[in-house]
């Protein structure tokens, strides 16, 4: 992990490395040790809007923090410009910590950034992070798989191209958990599509807003009322939607975990 980059530009400047680092779902304690070390030693951090201020505050006083906030409603920097920024910084000889919410390779466009860097001759290393689905499951005491309830779990983007053309039928139902990222704006469409594809309207679900953060909310409901639930409760981004029988397990899981904690 610590080997200095030995490549250099034609002008003899050593090329920096781009670290694609997962910052996890919000709670700084959920950073990996490697991510924490890199943030604490960074000179340049390029971060998106999902990275908690408390994580950014771990950077050294002199570090340059560059926000490329990419929350849906305020898409401030196009992806090509982000790629170019990473390459430019590295070619100027600086190591760059590219800090992303969750895991860089789960709906984080980390693959595109890695490709752009590698195509420009910039070395890349990826530090995995706890993805929102995993963080939300843990924080809401909601196992994504469970021997009695689900042996398949799918992560789907609610913003994917041709949303309603996707084959949703196999993703949810008996024995399956469906986790939808970026699904607030399309929640009602997704619920309608799942029901049209045969999923029971009373399939239980949970919406986890701000998972692992102090202001976390866990809302429960049934598939048919997903759109209403999101609107009525004024659910804000970031939030994740978990659909399937595991979301109805909580009382049992809670009792079980409470008993274990006492032992
Ligand atoms: N790379 C990230 C996902 C980026 S897409 C990861 O692995 O988690 C952004 C979406 O992730 C949000 O719209 C939301 O659906 C989800 N998300 C990220 N952080 C979250 C959090 N703390 N609580 C709930 N959902 C979150």
Image: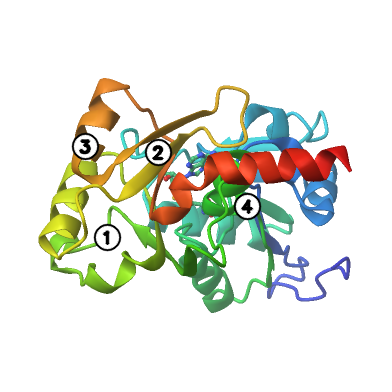
- Mark 1 Cα shell of 10 Å, populated few (<14), some (14-19), many (≥20): some
The answer to whether the residues at label 3 and label 1 have Cβ atoms under 8 Å apart is: no
CA–CA distance in space, label 2 to label 3: 25 Å
The answer to which of 44 and 71 lies nearer the viewer is 71
Ligand 1 neighbours mark 3 (CB distance < 8 Å):
no
Sequence-first tag of 1 and 2:
2
The residue to which callout 4 is attached is: 98
Residue at 31% x, 34% y: name it: 73
- 81 on left or right of 199: right
Ligand 1 neighbours mark 1 (CB distance < 8 Å):
no
- 87 on left or right of 194: right
**Residue 64 quadrant:** top right
**Residue 16 quadrant:** bottom right
Is residue 177 shown to the viewer in this render?
A: yes
Sequence-first tag of 3 and 1:
1
The residue to which callout 3 is attached is: 225
CA–CA distance in space, label 1 to label 2: 15 Å
């Amino acid at each position: 992990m610590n080997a200095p980059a030995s490549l250099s530009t034609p002008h003899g400047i050593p090329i920096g490395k781009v670290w694609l680092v997962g910052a996890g779902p919000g709670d700084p304690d959920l950073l990996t040790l490697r991510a924490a070390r890199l943030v604490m030693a960074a000179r340049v951090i390029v971060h998106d809007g999902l990275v908690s201020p408390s994580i950014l505050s771990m950077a050294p006083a002199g570090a340059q923090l560059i926000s490329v906030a990419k929350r849906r409603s305020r898409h401030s920097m196009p992806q090509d410009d982000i790629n170019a920024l990473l390459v430019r910084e590295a070619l100027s000889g600086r190591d760059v910590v590219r800090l992303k919410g969750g895991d860089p390779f789960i709906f984080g466009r980390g693959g595109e950034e890695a490709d752009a860097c590698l195509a420009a001759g910039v070395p890349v290393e990826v530090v995995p992070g706890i993805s929102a689905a995993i963080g939300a499951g843990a924080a809401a005491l909601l196992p994504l798989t469970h021997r009695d309830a689900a042996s398949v779990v799918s992560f789907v983007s609610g913003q994917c191209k041709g949303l309603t053309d996707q084959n949703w039928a196999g993703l949810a139902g008996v024995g399956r958990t469906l986790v939808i990222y970026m699904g607030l704006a399309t929640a009602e469409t997704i619920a309608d599509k799942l029901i049209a594809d045969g999923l029971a309207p009373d399939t239980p679900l949970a919406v986890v807003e701000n998972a692992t953060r102090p202001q976390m909310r866990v809302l429960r409901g049934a598939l048919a009322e997903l759109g209403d639930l999101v609107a009525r409760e004024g659910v804000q981004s970031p939030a994740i939607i978990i659909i399937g029988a595991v979301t109805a397990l909580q009382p049992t899981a809670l009792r079980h975990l409470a008993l274990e904690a006492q032992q």
